[in-house]
Image (cartoon, rainbow, N blue to C red):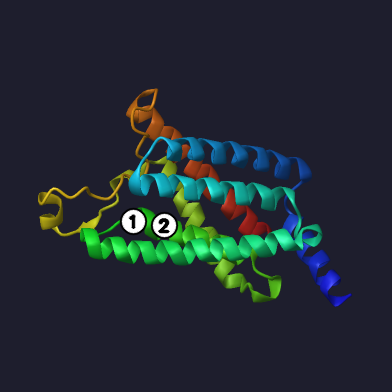
Amino acid sequence: MTVLAGAHTDHTAHMAGLPEWLRIGAALVLAAVAVLHARHGAHMAGQRRWWHLGHAVMAAGMAAMYLLPRMRHEGLHQGGLVLFALLAAGTVAAAVGLRSREGALNPIWTMSALDYLAMVYMLAAPALRPAWLGYAFAAYFACAVVGWVARAFDRLPVFARPAAVGAGHAGPALLSAPPEGGSGGPSRSRMSVALTLAVMAAAMAAMLVAM
């Protein structure tokens, strides 16, 4: 009974500020974002492919969280917790490995790791979620919305040794680089990706505040 009561309390708190129509609308938009990133990933290679596919998984997971309350889908939330914890750990390991190999710390993997950790936070049991950390994540995503809309992240400095670039190594991927040979031109493609990332950040912030 205690477990069920806790799940009901979590569900009520989670949805208190989000009407059903908004949750359904958010889930549909996030599903579209997941499809877009999956298509981008399918047309890319190397780091950019895995970055886009990771965002496709993240957007799909967020859509499921908006649609499927924890109270009735506890197993799904637990599975998502394991999945995103593994993605977070793998992203950190990959970032460290790429830093050693390329001589550059790519900011896209730093931001991706934070995104995955936020998913872990939201999927964790309520008793394990300190409120201050949720507000910190919400503030981070609010800043991310502004950054993606203003295209400020396109100009993030990359901490690389000049010799690594001069030696002919491929530098870190652009944050919103278009797929190879994509239609609509690079500028349009990059803008569409930046907007999807702003949408995802806004959805994250809203969910964190609603919790």
Q: Is residue 44 left or right of residue 55?
A: left
In the image, is residue 39 above or below residue 112? Answer: above
For the N terminus, the image quarter is bottom right
Q: Secondary structure at mark 1?
A: helix
Q: Position of residue 170 (x, y in %)?
A: 21, 47
Q: Which mark is residue 111?
A: 2
Q: Nearer the viewer, residue 75 or 149?
A: 75
Residue at (38, 38) in percent of width and height: 44
Whole-number angstrom distance, CA of label 1 to CA of label 2: 6 Å
In the image, is residue 128 above or below residue 119? Answer: below
Q: Secondary structure at mark 2?
A: helix
Residue at (48, 35) in percent of width and height: 39
What kind of residue is marked 1? Pro
For the C terminus, the image quarter is bottom right
Dot 1, how many residues are within 10 Å of its Cα: few (below 14), some (14-19), or many (20+)? some
Residue at (50, 55) in percent of width and height: 141
Q: Which residue is mark 1?
A: 107
Task: Verify CB contact (< 8 Å) between mark 1 and mark 2.
Answer: yes
Q: Quadrant of residue 159?
A: bottom left
